[in-house]
Amino acid sequence: MPILPITQETWADINVLQNDVYHQIEPEPLEVLQDKWIKSPDLCFCYREDGLLLSYLLSHAWNSDTTPSLSELLPKDYAGPILFLHDLAVSTAAKGKGIGTRMVEHLLKKAQQGNFDKISLVSIQSSKAFWERHGFIEVPHDVSDSYGDDATYMERAL
């Protein structure tokens, strides 16, 4: 499976994919997504098949139990012992092919190589069951309204 680093050339396809998969929240500006990649390039990657971008994952180091808001750049003092999984998007045409699972497994390997205590994320668009299958548990937590109505904060220890 070709999991690849994100490059500058990937961003036009990421923008298209983001618009394909997000219906309950407003897609984020590319500069906000690119900020995660610029600050943690080894924790951001994508999956292509036959030249088509079918998935991307953006994550970054984080230093707080508060969740970063969507559509905002990371603060200057963002780095810390938490790996925040900001975004996993899988094309609607690729659903059910196991690509999301492989992307998460790849991130877990990267996380174990780093000095992270846990991975946190905000589940949106009814994805909670997917994250539970990958060892994430719901943790009571305030989540920014920017994540939508069904947002659930989740964590996984490393």
Image (spheres, helix red, strand yellow):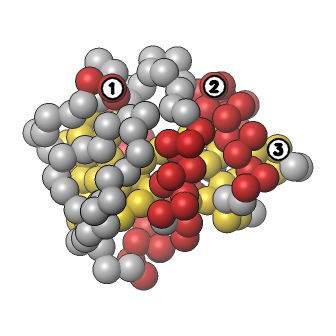
Work out how far the residue at label 2 is from the one at label 3, CA to CA, in angstroms.
15 Å
Work out how far the residue at label 1 is from the one at label 2, CA to CA, in angstroms.
16 Å
Q: For marks 1 and 3, give the one nearer the viewer.
A: 1
Amino acid identity at mark 3: Leu
Please tell me the numbered disc located at residue 19. Answer: 2
Give the residue at the far left of this rendering: 140
- Where does residue 101 sit, x and y in percent of width and height? 53, 52
Q: Secondary structure at mark 2?
A: helix
| Residue matched to label 1 | 146
Amino acid identity at mark 2: Asn
x 67%, y 41%: residue: 14
- Where does residue 158 sit, x and y in percent of width and height? 28, 71
- Where does residue 6 sit, x and y in percent of width and height? 67, 59
Q: Is residue 53 left or right of residue 154?
A: right
Q: Is residue 10 left or right of residue 29?
A: right
Amino acid identity at mark 1: Ser
x 13%, y 39%: residue: 141
Q: Secondary structure at mark 3?
A: strand
Looking at the image, which is closer to me, 26 or 124? 26
Q: Give whichever of discs 1 and 3 has the lower sequence position.
A: 3
Q: Give whichever of discs 1 and 2 has the lower sequence position.
A: 2
Q: Quadrant of residue 117?
A: bottom left
Q: Is residue 33 visible?
A: yes
Work out how far the residue at label 1 is from the one at label 3, CA to CA, in angstroms.
29 Å
| Residue matched to label 3 | 52
Give the residue at the far front of this rendering: 76
x 29%, y 29%: residue: 151
